[in-house]
Image (spheres, rainbow, N blue to C red):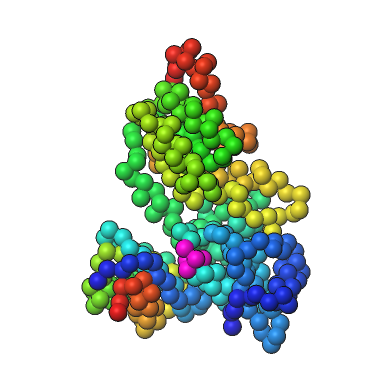
Amino acid sequence: MNIQRRGQAGTMQSSDLMVIVEPAEALAIEIESTVKKQFEHLIRARIEAVLARHGAERLRVSINDRGALDYAIEARLTTALQRAGGLS
Amino acid sequence: MIMQLTSRPDIAAARALIEHNGLRFEPAFDALYGVHDDGELIAVGARAGNVLKMLTVAAARRGGSLLGEVVSALVADGLNAGCATLFIYTKPALAHSFEALHFTPLAACAEAVWLEFGHGLRHWLAAQQTLRRPGANGALFLDSLTLAEAAARQIPVAAQRVDHLYVFVAGDAAWNELLPLARQASRGVGNAVVVDGGPYRNGEAVPGYFLPADAPLARLRAELDATVYAAHLAPFFGIVRHFANGEPDCTHAILAAHGIQPAAIPSANRSTSRGGNR
């Protein structure tokens, strides 16, 4: 699955996150989070799981997290991928 | 709930909120968003091009999620509008509020801080990797139509004085008029490299809403642009000499502090007679 354009979802309010995906040569995941020290590895794992499920490899994912839970991460990323034309 | 403000009463309320909080309302914007509570406007912010501005939260409502709500709406609006990156200019004392929302400081002076959403500068530099050249390099900017033709004529002369000369093309006229001019002037100059200057010479877009009415906006704009150039672009491209093209004198000290020697663009006739000494 390749995305065709930039897609964005979410907000920077507490307990939410903003996800931006854009086409790239290879997969790159950037995470900024209020709980980065404690939970970056878990956020990354969740992102990678969603991307793997959709076969998304050539994109940059920028995460601006304000303490979102797993289900929010998954929902926001899926929406951003849809808006980027990567999911039918 | 946040919403776009388009009606006259909403815009008037936004102006009142902004001015009541010691800021100035600037009517030039592409989008204006606000949050109401019980009919009262309690938070507002605007986007003008790639700049978010006039971000204001009513004093009694600060400390919660309102700023994040407004910034989120403006960022989403800007991305949907096709902005490659988004900036905020604010007072130094308030920069931390935006850093908490994942804005990265790019440059600062006594009166203002320039912040960018995310890490656009890092990505932009990475995208320029193939244009990097070794050596003690120089640069000049073509970003003003009035000065561009004269500057373009000096590209071959300036290029004699450095290992490689970067010709940065920036500004509103960059693509239609300046880029062809830069390419034509650089043709046959083996060590000249034309670079899309990207969004990091943004001075004309710096808003003044948070500054006193008599603030030296032109100097401030030039200083912020020069700082980003000197601190980030120049080291990446190995630039040690900058051929001035109408930049104000206040930028010279900034360049010098970063090891960049300001130089006047040499006159073609004079330089030819001196053999293009470096």
- Foreground pick, B164 / B29: B29
Residue B209 visible at all: yes
Asked where in the image residue A74 lies, by quadrant, the reply is: bottom left
In the rendered view, would you say B125 is above or below B166?
Answer: below
Q: Is residue B211 above or below residue A85?
A: above
Q: Position of residue A47 (x, y in %)?
A: 31, 73
Q: What secondary structure prevails in the magenta region? A: helix
Residue B17 relative to residue B152: left or right: right
**In the image, what residue occupies the spot 42% across and 78% down?**
A68
Query: Which quadrant: the C terminus of chain B?
Result: top left
Which residue is pictured at 64% across the width and 72% down the height? B44
Which quarter of the figure is the N terminus of chain B placed in? bottom right
Return the residue nearer the eye: B4 or A48. Answer: B4
Q: Horizontally, is B114 left or right of B82 in the view?
A: right
Q: Is residue B236 left or right of residue B269?
A: left
* Placement of A42 over or under B125, stated as above or below: below
Q: Is residue B79 on the magenta stretch? A: yes
- Foreground pick, A50 / B192: B192
Residue found at x 45% / y 23%: B157
Residue B82 place in picture, x, y as percent? 47, 63
Report the magenta residues as a range: B78-82
- On screen, residue A38 above or below B124: below
Q: In the image, residue B55 lies at what x, y percent?
A: 63, 67
| Residue B8 included in the magenta stretch of the image | no
Residue lying farthest to the top in this orientation: B273
Residue B247 appears in which quarter of the rendering? top right
